[in-house]
């Protein structure tokens, strides 16, 4: 928020300089972003009066003027379109210095002498407006220094407020803070009710009381909007970053800056029937004051008449019902809108207004009537008019309830690290507008005013006491404590080890959004519904992911669109599922591989990675982690039938490995063979603690075995049966040959195995080995239907 220092000092004027004032405000939690003078540096500019104007004899666009500076009358040549007899303007006399070190000298323009210069706002560094001369009020004293007359010895201070401090989005709020910090009184202007002089009142109906708990309206008849706003008001608005438009708009903006209550003025003749505060209906459109036409969406709170919307509540009014110089009767609006109802609505329509900025953060819900009276009085002073009664429609059930918060002395002292005198605490709370309702045995019961919606718990009160007392006045203490080593289970591998493994194997780590495109997610995980976000960044990031594949596949598309043919990515992160009333978050590990198995060079060729390459990477990872995982053929809606494996650990599902389904790949417009895996991270990081085992000094015995077995029997089943019946002295089992041919019959294959036995303390004899070997053959025959190959 920008404000004029002089305007603030009209409310509260501590005996401190500008820099100290800004430092105070910053230390109180209202950070000052910067400041700048309200005008450029100039001298020798006085109030001048144009006494006569005649055309330049040799130039169509120039005028020859006689200008008085209060002492002398001199000739000045001027080309401004608005120069006229009787006009009072800033007059730079000969010898004046304008911003940019521009010195005024006697000159001749097209043969006519000119002694001085009539100035626009831009030439004085007041604004960018250079369309014409700066017009001063008719009662401006001729000859007075312009800088003194306009009180330009002032700065504009820019305060960057946190969202919770909406109470300081006004001169009133800033003045209250400065008054408390310096222990001086705040001189607020007296706001007296304006007596009604006619009985006409607006017809107001609130159909959405939850979004608009309080709405006030008043009719002001027979106004003259051709009257200009007074210069003092225009200057205060300009120094606060707001351009003067007309008297009605200027007054509502002025009240908003002064008190913090946004207001709006409608042309009564453009309101058909009465005012209705309701939610927008599907298909309704509205042309806003900035000329933009928007299609209103359901859930948007609007101000309407009996035929159509005339404003987006708390954001911007409509062009059709806006005031103009021809407006004779006004309908003034002052309301309290629910911040949650308005949150994000301005951004939804690509807007950001001073009103929406305040309403979204929370306006004082008791301020509307006071602001209405203030605006009415100012309007009557400027444009005249006849005020009517104020009509107020309020819903007591929806207006925020008054809050009471207890503050304990012991808790206050513990948090701030020192004891603060009870009288000091009570004085700070009182000067902040907080009322001590009751003294407790160990603290205070505090009533929170309506302009502080950010105070709701004890810690909020402690913060208020701390920042007003002065954070720099609190004692500096260094934290002490013993830091013990945290025990970690040796069997649990850190996630960093998994990340390092994949990086070592040529993968790149990806970090994707936890919210994804619902269309992509439906393709890769159609059986589970994602959790929709209430306020998504965009439509393609509107649901929480149920699988890490959604983000990884979009990353693959992004890279392929940039001519990257070889992609190897992995990611660790959470997936989100709704389980009843709670959200289940599970850490996952996922990866995707596309393109060549190795980077292209003269020795590796161009072999594409396949299912077994990725399976090999996972098996290497499982060996590193010290766990045993089974790969079982299965089906997944996002994976290619026949190229899908379910991963099991001790019979429990821990993940998937496979090739992306061709239809899914086509819908996502991806190229090449897409290999993917996804695992439950917690299920694989816990392995086995390695134990030392002495190497046997005795010879190893090997037996080879060739069996004919069905092609549909997995090697893992053969390995399981053979290992189970080979005895505890079996040290290794390896397959060294696989053969399929017509001689074996359809649906059969030959599998050659090597079995190794070794005893740690002696040499195994032939009978022992033969018995174990025969047991393996019998088990394979009985359990898997295998036969010995002759």
Image (tube, rainbow, N blue to C red):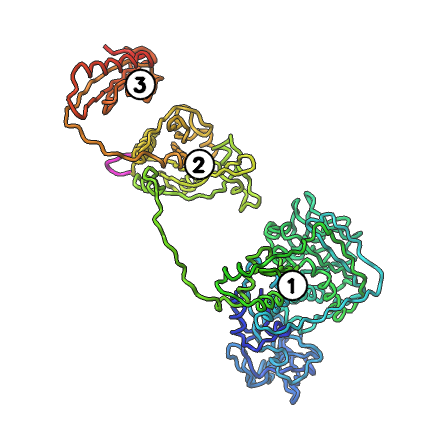
Q: Are marks 3 and 2 in contact (CB under 8 Å)?
A: no
Q: Where, by quadrant of the figure, is residue 71 drawn?
A: bottom right
**Can you tell which of label 3 and label 1 is closer to the viewer?**
1
Q: Are marks 1 and 2 in contact (CB under 8 Å)?
A: no
Would residue 603 be counted in the magenta stretch? yes
Q: Which residues are magenta?
A: 600-605
- Could you tell which of marks 1 and 2 lies nearer the N-terminus? 1
Against 423, residue 458 (above or below) is: above
x and y percentages locating residue 565 in the rendered image: 36, 38
> Could you say which disc has been placed on residue 494 in the image?
none
Q: Which residue is mark 3?
A: 721
* Predominant secondary structure, magenta span: loop
Q: Which residue is mark 2?
A: 549
Q: Is residue 404 visible?
A: yes
x and y percentages locating residue 525 in the rendered image: 48, 32
Q: CA distance from mark 3 to mark 2?
A: 35 Å
x and y percentages locating residue 58 in the rendered image: 62, 79
Would residue 577 be counted in the magenta stretch? no
């Amino acid at each position: 928020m920008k404000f004029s220092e002089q305007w603030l000092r009209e409310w509260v004027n501590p005996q401190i300089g500008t820099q100290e004032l800004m430092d105070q405000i910053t230390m109180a939690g209202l950070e000052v972003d910067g400041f700048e003078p309200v005008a450029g540096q100039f001298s020798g500019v006085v109030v001048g009066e144009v006494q006569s104007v005649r055309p330049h004899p040799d130039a169509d666009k120039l005028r020859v003027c006689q200008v008085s500076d209060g002492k002398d009358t001199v000739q000045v040549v001027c080309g401004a379109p608005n120069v006229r007899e009787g006009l009072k303007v800033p007059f730079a006399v000969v010898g004046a210095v304008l911003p940019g070190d521009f010195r005024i000298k006697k000159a001749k323009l097209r043969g006519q002498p000119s002694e001085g210069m009539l100035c626009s706002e831009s030439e004085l560094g007041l604004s960018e407006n250079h369309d014409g001369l700066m017009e001063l009020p008719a009662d401006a004293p001729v000859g007075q220094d312009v800088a003194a007359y306009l009180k330009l010895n002032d700065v504009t201070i820019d305060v960057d407020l946190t969202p919770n401090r909406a109470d300081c989005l006004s001169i009133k709020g800033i003045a209250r803070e400065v008054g408390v910090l310096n222990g001086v009184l705040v001189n607020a202007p007296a706001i007296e009710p304006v007596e009604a002089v006619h009985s006409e009142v607006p017809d107001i109906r609130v159909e959405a009381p939850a979004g608009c708990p309080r709405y006030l309206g008043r009719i002001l008849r027979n106004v003259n909007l051709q009257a200009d706003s007074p210069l003092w008001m225009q200057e205060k608005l300009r120094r606060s970053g707001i351009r003067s438009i007309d008297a009605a708009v200027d007054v509502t903006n002025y009240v908003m800056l002064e008190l913090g209550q946004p207001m709006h003025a409608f042309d009564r003749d453009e309101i058909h029937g009465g005012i209705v505060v309701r939610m927008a209906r599907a298909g309704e459109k509205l042309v806003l004051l900035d000329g933009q036409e928007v299609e209103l969406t359901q859930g948007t709170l609007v101000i309407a008449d009996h035929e159509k919307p005339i404003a987006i509540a708390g954001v911007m009014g409509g062009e059709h019902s806006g005031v103009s110089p021809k407006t004779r009767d006004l309908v003034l609006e002052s309301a309290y809108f629910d911040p949650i109802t308005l949150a994000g609505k301005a951004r939804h329509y690509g807007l950001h207004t001073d009103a929406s900025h305040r309403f979204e953060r929370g306006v004082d819900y008791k301020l509307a009537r006071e602001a209405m009276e203030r605006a009415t009085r100012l309007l009557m002073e400027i444009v005249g008019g006849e005020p009517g009664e104020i009509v107020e429609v309020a819903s007591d059930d929806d207006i925020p309830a008054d809050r009471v918060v207890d503050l304990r002395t012991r808790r206050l002292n513990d948090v701030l690290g020192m004891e603060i005198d009870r009288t000091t605490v009570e004085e700070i709370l009182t000067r902040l507008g907080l009322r001590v309702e009751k003294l407790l045995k160990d603290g205070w019961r505090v009533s929170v005013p309506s302009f502080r919606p950010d105070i709701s718990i004890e810690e909020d009160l402690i913060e208020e006491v701390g920042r007003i007392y002065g954070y720099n006045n609190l004692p500096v203490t260094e934290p002490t404590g013993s830091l013990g080593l945290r025990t970690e289970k040796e069997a649990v591998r850190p996630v960093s080890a998994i990340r390092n493994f994949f990086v070592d194997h040529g993968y790149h780590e990806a970090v994707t959004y936890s919210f994804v495109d619902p269309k992509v997610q439906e393709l890769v995980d159609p059986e589970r519904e994602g959790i929709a976000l209430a306020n998504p960044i965009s439509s393609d990031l509107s649901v929480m992911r149920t699988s890490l594949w959604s983000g990884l596949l979009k990353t693959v598309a992004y890279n392929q669109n940039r001519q990257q043919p070889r992609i190897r990515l992995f990611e660790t992160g959470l997936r989100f599922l709704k389980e009843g009333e709670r959200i289940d978050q599970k850490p996952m590990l996922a990866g995707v591989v596309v393109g060549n198995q190795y980077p292209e060079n003269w020795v590796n060729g161009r072999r594409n990675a396949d299912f077994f390459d990725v399976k090999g990477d996972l098996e290497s990872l499982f060996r590193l982690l010290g766990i045993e995982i089974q790969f079982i053929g299965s089906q997944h809606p996002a994976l290619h039938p026949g190229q899908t494996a379910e991963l099991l650990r001790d019979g429990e599902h821990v993940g998937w490995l496979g090739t992306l389904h061709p239809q899914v790949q086509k819908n996502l417009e991806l190229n090449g063979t897409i290999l993917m895996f996804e695992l439950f991270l917690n299920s694989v990081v816990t392995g086995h603690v390695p134990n030392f085992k002495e190497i046997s000094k005795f010879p190893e015995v090997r037996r080879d075995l060739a069996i004919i077995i069905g092609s549909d029997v997995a090697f893992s089943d053969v390995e399981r049966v053979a290992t189970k019946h080979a005895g505890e002295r079996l040290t290794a089992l390896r397959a060294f040959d696989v053969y399929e041919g017509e001689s074996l019959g359809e649906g059969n294959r030959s599998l050659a195995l090597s079995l190794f036995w070794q005893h740690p303390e002696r040499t195994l004899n032939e009978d022992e080995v033969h018995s174990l070997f025969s047991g393996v053959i019998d088990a394979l025959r009985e359990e898997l239907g295998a036969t010995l190959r002759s």
